[in-house]
Structure formats: C-alpha cells, structure tokens
Image (cartoon, rainbow, N blue to C red):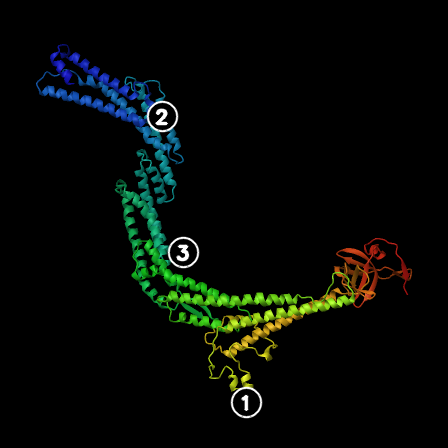
C-alpha cells in the first residue's frame, strides 16, 4: 500500500482516480482469487470434501487477510489526509464490494461447516429417536454439496437459494429435537428421572434444544413431588421403612436422607441455572425446598441426639457376665446383649453417614474384634459342649460326671465375675476352649477304644459257628476228631478275645482313674484306703477287706455278675444336661462306677457267647435234616402251608445212613384236592396234592408226613390234581372212598 501511495504521487498514469480505482479493484479481485485457491488447494480439492475443521481454519485465515487489507487501506488514507497529500479520489464501496460479497459467501460456507461439526455428535450417541433428526441434517448437507456450481463464486446467486433451504431444513430438525426432548420429559414420572434425561441431552451441548424451558418444567414438577413427599413423611415418620441389616437409628437417618435426596438432586442441578431459578415459578419451588430441608434436618438431628443419650445406657451392659445359665437344664448361653451389637453397627453406620460419634461408642466399635471374637469362639465352644453332653451314652454317663464337673467349675466365673471389659477375657475364653476340647478328645478316645477293641470283638464272637461242617462227606470218627479240634481252636480264640476285651475295659477304667486323686479321708472324715498289711489283725481284717488298697483297686468280685441299670432315654437326657458343679465325687463313687462299667461289659461278653451258641443251634435246627434223597420239597401242614425245595445237600455218612444238610430253595403253598361225589359214590384222587410256588404249580410225589410238616419230592410229570386246579380237564386215577 505504501508503494501504491508513492507511485500515485510520482507517476502521472496512476495519479488519476480511475487508474487508482482500477488498481485497487484488481488487488481486491486478486485477493479473492488467491483466497479461493488457498481454500481449494488451487482447485485440486472440492470445497465439500475438505474436513469442516480445516475448512473453518482456512476461512478464518482468509478473513484475517482481507480485514488486514481493509485496515491498511483505511490507515493509508488517513495518513494521506493528515499529511496534506492529495487524497485518492476513489470509492471504497466500489473497491471492497467484491471482498464483502466473497466474505459473505465464506460466512455461509463457514456456517454450514459449523452446523456439520455441531450436529456430528448425533452420530456418536445412542438415544433412540434422534437418528431421524440426524438424517434430516445430513440430507440437507448432501443436497447443498451435490450442486454442480462453485460455491465460492459469489456471483452465482443459486447458492444463496440453496443455503436458505439448508437453513430451513436445519431449523426444522432443531424444532423436531426440541419437541422430542419435551415429549421424553413429559413421559418421565418424577423430577429425578427428568433430570437424568436432560443430563443426557445437556451433554450434547446443543443450544437448539432450549433446555432451560425443560428445567423450568422440572422445577414445577419438583414442587408437586415435595408436596407428596411431605405426606409420605407425615405418614411414615413414626415407623419408616428401614433397609435390611440396618440398625434402627441409622436406618431412620438413611430413610430421611433418601427423601431429602429425591428433592436435593434436582435442586442441585437447578442451582447452576440462575436464569431458571430467577423465574417466578421456580421461586415457589425454592421456598418449599427450604421448608422441607428444615423439617428433614430437624428429624435427623433429633434421632442422632437420642442415640447419643442411648449410648450411655448401653455402657452398663458391658459390665454384665459373659455367660448365663438355664438352671433347669444347665444350658449355657453367651450373654452378649443385642444392644451391644446394635451399638457397634450404629457406630459404623454413623461414620459412613459422616455424623458425630461419642467417644465410648467409638471405643467399643474400635474394640469390636476383642468383643465379638471371644463371643463367637465361646458360642461355638458351648455348642460343642452341648453336642458332647448329648452324645454321652448310658454306659458312661455316671463315670463322666466328674469330667462334666470340671467343665462346670471352669465355667462358673463366667457367670459372675468375668465381664466383657475384663482384662483377661481372651485368656479365660481360651482356657475354657482348651478344657472342653480336652474333655471332648478324652471321650472320643473312650468311644474309639470301645468301638475298635470291644464292640468289634463282641460282634465277631456272636458270629462264631460252633459246628463243624465239612465240605465233603467224612466218616463219623473223622467228624468227631475234627469237631474236637474245632472246639479247641474256638476255645483258644475266645480266650484270646476275652482277654483283649478285658484289657480294653481295664484301660478305659484306668483312663478315668488316672485323672483323679483322693485324700486319705473322705468329706465325712472316714478313711478311704485299706490299712497297711502290718496293721491288719483278726479283729479288723473283715472290715478292712471292703476298703481298696489304692485308687486302682476297683474290682469287687461279688458284683461282677450283677445286673446293671441303664437309664432310659428321658432320664438319660436329664442326666446329660444336669449341673454337676456341686456334686461330691469320692472314691466309693468312682469304685461303683468302674465296677458298673466292668460288669456291663462282662455281661455283654456273656451275651455275645450266648448269641454265638444260639446261632449254632439255629444252624443245627434249620439245616440238619435226615433224608435219603437230594432234592426234596418240604410242605407245612398248617392252614397257609409253605413248600421248601432243598438241593445240593451235603452228606455225612453214619454207618449205613447219611446226615443231610439241605439248603432251602423255595417256600410254597400246599393245595389238596378233596374227594368228590359221583353217582352216589365218593371218589378220591390218588395224587391229590400240588405245590404252588411263586404263582406256578408243581407236581409232588413220595410225600411223607413228619411232626408238624409234610415232605415231598418234586415230580417230573404233570398230575391230575395239577391240571384240575389249573381249570382244565384230565383223566384221573381214583379209588373209592371207604
């Protein structure tokens, strides 16, 4: 511009207004052409193919150049005027008309690019229903970009018409989006849900949605909801709905805060929109919000203060004994009041709710492991102790009394002096657990010894067979010799087993005796042990003979075979859950219990021997029958007679005869066909007996009558009685009845 100024002063050709104007117009046109080439990369790229951010950036640079050109021109004109030079007599409108029109065209192109950028977010959202508005805007963009003319040629006025259509279609899409948002907000049942919908649209950052109007509707809806919540508060404040596993006070505070949350969340969103809160309709909502906020705060503070006062009352419960007992059944329970657990839970929830907590409640909550740990351990231990007592059998209930007494004495301090704030609480609970575990292990060892060394041996004795049964026929002399050998072997085995069981019983008794120690005199001052041998004489040996030499001397031979009374089930339960704390268990009690235990197992051994003998006799009675055939049928003569088939019998030769050991094959019913009358003559069938076995009829023959039974042999042919009983016809041999 300085060069043109200097040239116009010296050159006569450019000193005329026409030539200066022409030069300026050429410069403006050249700027327009240069800007156009810069935007389209010398027409190598279509305007609509350029990305919108890049296109806007280039348009801004072109505008900056043109504005700079205009400002320099105006500055030069002002300097010429101020320096008393001859001014340019040119028209600025004529010079800058092409620039202004080009800039206007660039503004329209820039508006289209901005519109594309603004609504490009619609491609990335997942709001159902918004896709049709995105399609409208994209369709308008495609329509204007598909025209064949050059949009940067400002002389083509068709672009202006197409631009107006584009703007109109975009406005229609914007109005549609506004109506769509309004429709979604009206379908929401509460102000909070409307806020969630508006939050999604607010993230789109689209001014066309006019969300302030929707937020004003939210304020009106919030006012109605606060009226309803006030009614809910008045109805339920005495007995509100408390969530599961929440303590009462914390549950009420959570409930009242949930009501406050329903009105506070929408209000917090309205606070950032001052234009909405300044509206007259929103002012009523704000006033009622402040009123509800005061009510809710008063409710929360009242219950929080009441809980503060209640904490001091719970403090006394920590001084209570850690256990209680049901004196009727001696059932022990952990005496941890539920108020203490509730206090711990309330304190933890108060921390979560960011409320103040008393020092005592905080201390209890911090030390909850020291309280709840021993309480849980003690509860499980008492359950094990109850299970142990319930498992005591009638055999051991009496001799286990002193062991139960040890546990009762160990638990006695827990009923009076050991409290939840005692310093030795954990050590005491550990001692109780160890004691109960010791008694439990001791009794389990007793049961294991009884099962493995006594009951199993008794079971094997009761299954003995005292009869010699050869696999093959043998002579009578050999049978007698083998029977004697079997008897000797059985005697040896029984003696060995009897000794083993006796030692097992004595081991069990010694396990109890080892746990006890006795003073020389009992509680009444009487001697409990026998005098030394050198002090025995003719006057005292009889009375001293009834006293034991030491605590292991429990055998009393006159009581070995006495009958032992075992407590029935109802009495046993009473004995199991009885309080043995104050019983006197002295030496004579121990001797009686040990002797009862010894006598009981002695009688059990005798019963096992009797069971083995009975089993052998039953074998003889059921399996040894004397007959001369192999396959026999045994028919009972009772009303519902049964038939038994013996096969594969074993023979023992005795002189000319044989002893049979048949095995029962089947049991059948006996059916007899009685005589019939024919032409005044009574006819009797020769074969009038059949056997019915499992629904099948069998012919029998060679029947013989024995004491209480009939024995027959299976026949291979069908008999007349079988065919008649089956409902058919038969040719029968008969003989006339007498």
Q: Is residue 697 above or below residue 266?
A: below
Give the position of the C terminus as an image quadrant: bottom right
Q: Return the x and y of residue 561 as percentages of the image width and height.
A: 61, 77
Give the position of the N terminus as an image quadrant: top left
Q: Is residue 432 above or below residue 647?
A: below
Q: Earlier in the sequence, mark 3 or mark 2?
A: 2
Q: Are marks 3 and 1 in contact (CB under 8 Å)?
A: no
Residue 494 visible in the current orientation: yes
Q: Earlier in the sequence, mark 3 or mark 1?
A: 3
Residue that badge 1 annotates: 539
**Residue located at (41% from left, 63% from top):** 375
Q: Residues within 10 Å of mark 2 (few under 14, many from 20)?
A: some
Q: Nearer the viewer, residue 9 or 78?
A: 9
Regarding mark 1 in the picture, which secondary structure is present there? loop
Residue that badge 3 annotates: 245
Q: Return the x and y of residue 489 as percentages of the image width and height.
A: 68, 68
């Amino acid at each position: 511009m300085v060069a043109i100024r200097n040239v116009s002063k010296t050159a006569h050709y450019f000193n005329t207004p026409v030539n200066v104007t022409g030069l300026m117009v050429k410069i403006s046109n050249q700027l327009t052409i240069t800007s156009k080439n810069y935007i389209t990369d010398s027409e190598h790229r279509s305007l609509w193919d350029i990305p919108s951010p890049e296109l806007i950036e280039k348009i801004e640079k072109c505008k900056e150049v043109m504005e700079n050109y205009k400002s320099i021109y105006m500055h030069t004109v002002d300097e010429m005027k101020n320096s008393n030079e001859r001014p340019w007599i040119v028209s600025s409108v004529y010079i800058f008309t092409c620039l202004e029109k080009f800039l206007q065209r660039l503004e329209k192109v820039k508006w289209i690019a901005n519109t594309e950028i603004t609504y490009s977010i619609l491609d990335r959202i997942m709001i159902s229903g918004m896709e049709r508005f995105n399609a409208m805007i994209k369709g308008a963009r495609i329509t204007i970009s598909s025209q064949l003319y050059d949009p940067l040629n400002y002389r083509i006025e068709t672009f202006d018409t197409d631009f107006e259509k584009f703007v109109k279609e975009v406005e229609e899409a914007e109005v549609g989006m506004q109506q769509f948002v309004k429709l979604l907000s009206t379908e929401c049942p509460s102000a909070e849900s409307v806020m969630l919908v508006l939050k999604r649209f607010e993230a789109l950052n689209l001014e066309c949605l006019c969300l302030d109007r929707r937020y004003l509707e939210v304020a009106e809806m919030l006012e109605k909801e606060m009226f309803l919540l006030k009614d809910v508060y008045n109805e339920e404040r005495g007995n509100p709905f408390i969530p599961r596993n929440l303590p009462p006070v914390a549950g009420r505070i959570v409930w009242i805060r949930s009501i406050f949350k329903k009105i506070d969340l929408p209000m917090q969103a309205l606070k950032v929109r001052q234009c909405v809160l300044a509206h007259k309709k929103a002012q009523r909502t704000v006033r009622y919000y402040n009123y509800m906020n005061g009510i809710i705060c008063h409710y929360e503070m009242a219950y929080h203060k009441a809980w503060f006062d209640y904490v001091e009352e719970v403090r006394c419960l920590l001084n209570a004994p850690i256990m209680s007992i049901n004196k009727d059944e001696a059932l022990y329970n952990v005496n941890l009041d539920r108020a203490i657990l509730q206090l711990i839970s309330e304190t933890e929830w108060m921390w979560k709710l960011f409320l103040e907590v008393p020092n005592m409640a905080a201390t209890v909550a911090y030390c909850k492991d020291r309280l709840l740990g021993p309480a849980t351990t003690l509860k499980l231990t008492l359950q094990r102790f109850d299970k142990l007592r319930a498992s005591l059998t009638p055999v051991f209930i009496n001799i286990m009394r002193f062991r139960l007494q040890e546990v009762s004495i160990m638990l006695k301090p827990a009923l009076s002096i050991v409290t939840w704030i005692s310093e030795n609480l954990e050590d005491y609970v550990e001692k109780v657990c160890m004691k109960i575990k010791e008694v439990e292990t001791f009794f389990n060892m007793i049961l294991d010894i009884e099962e493995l060394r006594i009951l199993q041996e008794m079971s094997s004795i009761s299954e003995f067979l005292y009869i010699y049964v050869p696999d093959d026929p043998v002579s009578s002399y050999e049978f007698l010799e083998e029977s004697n050998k079997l008897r000797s072997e059985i005697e040896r085995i029984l003696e060995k087993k009897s000794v083993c069981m006796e030692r097992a019983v004595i081991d069990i008794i010694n396990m109890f005796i080892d746990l006890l120690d006795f003073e020389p005199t009992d509680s009444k001052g009487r001697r409990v042990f026998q005098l030394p041998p050198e002090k025995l004489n003719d006057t005292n040996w009889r009375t001293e003979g009834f006293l034991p030499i030491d605590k292991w001397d429990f055998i009393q031979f006159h009581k070995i075979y006495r009958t032992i009374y075992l407590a029935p089930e109802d009495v046993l339960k009473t004995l199991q859950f009885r309080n043995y704390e104050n019983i006197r268990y002295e030496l004579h009690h121990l001797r009686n219990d040990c002797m009862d235990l010894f006598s009981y197992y002695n009688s059990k051994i005798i019963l096992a021997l009797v069971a083995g003998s009975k089993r052998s006799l039953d074998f003889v009675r059921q399996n040894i029958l004397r007959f001369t055939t192999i396959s026999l049928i045994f028919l009972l003569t009772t009303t519902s007679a049964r038939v038994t088939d013996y096969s594969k019998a074993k023979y023992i030769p005795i002189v000319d005869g044989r002893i049979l050991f048949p095995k029962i094959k089947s049991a059948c019913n006996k059916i007899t066909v009685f005589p019939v009358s024919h032409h005044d003559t009574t006819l009797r069938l020769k074969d009038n007996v059949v056997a019915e076995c499992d629904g099948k009829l069998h012919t029998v023959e060679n029947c013989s009558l024995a004491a209480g039974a009939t024995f027959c042999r299976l026949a291979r042919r069908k008999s007349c009685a079988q065919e008649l009983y089956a409902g058919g016809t038969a040719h029968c041999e008969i003989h006339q009845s007498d």
